[in-house]
Image (tube, grey):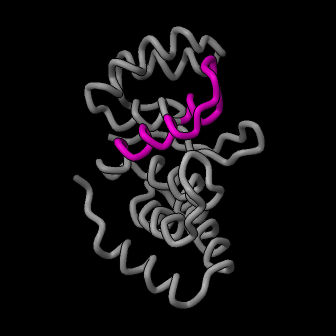
Amino acid sequence: MKRGIATLFASGVLLVALTGAAIAGPLDDAIAALQRGDYTMAMRLIRPLAEQGNAGAQTDLGVIYDSGLGVPQDYAQAVVWYHKAADQGDAGALFNLGFMYAQGRGVPQDYAQAHMWFSLAASRAPDAAVRGQAVKARDAVAAKMTPAQIAEARRLASEWKPK
């Protein structure tokens, strides 16, 4: 199943968000509602899918909270949903977690965690453009880290497995 992934700049924050795709039904309808700014309808459609374990919907729900799209902006809640989707290997959620840890949004700032999540996103990205973004973000974080921190981040990434 392919999903189109694009970058979204919201409040100056780089996020990876699903923008449409081959999943028919409620998730497509929710994404269409997001695109037209009908956040109430989007939330009504996405939340049940996210709660049922749909990784794409979980990532999208994280983006909604991260960006404050029709809800109060809540970084901690965004991280919760990104983690749920990341646990399933969703590349967008992996990337977004890297960003949250790099910026300290909803979690304590932790460059080793950010590096790990960006590395995982790069290894699971569906296309070269997204892979390139994840590598660029990982390298930017690595420039702020010690060699020991980078080694720890690599160890964490090599040991990580989707649940």
Is 82 covered by the magenta stretch?
A: yes
Q: Quadrant of residue 102?
A: bottom right
The quarter of the rendered structure image containing the N terminus is top left
Q: Residue at x 37, y 72 (%)?
A: 157
The secondary structure that dominates the magenta segment is helix
In this view, the residue in front, 9 or 156, is 156
Q: In the image, 86: left or right of 140? A: left
- The magenta-colored residue range is 63-85
Marker count (numbered):
0
Q: In the image, 163: left or right of 112? A: left
Q: Residue at x 33, y 18 (%)?
A: 48
Work out which residue is located at the far left of the displayed protein and give it: 163
Q: Where is 81 relative to 90, above or below?
A: above
In this view, the residue in front, 135 or 128, is 135
Work out which residue is located at the far front of the displayed protein and give it: 108
Residue 8 position, x and y percent, is 66, 40
Q: Where is 29 relative to 126, above or below?
A: above
Is 128 covered by the magenta stretch?
A: no
Work out which residue is located at the far right of the displayed protein and give it: 12
Q: Residue at x 38, y 42 (%)?
A: 2
Residue 86 position, x and y percent, is 37, 49
Residue 16 position, x and y percent, is 57, 45
Q: Residue at x 56, y 30 (%)?
A: 65
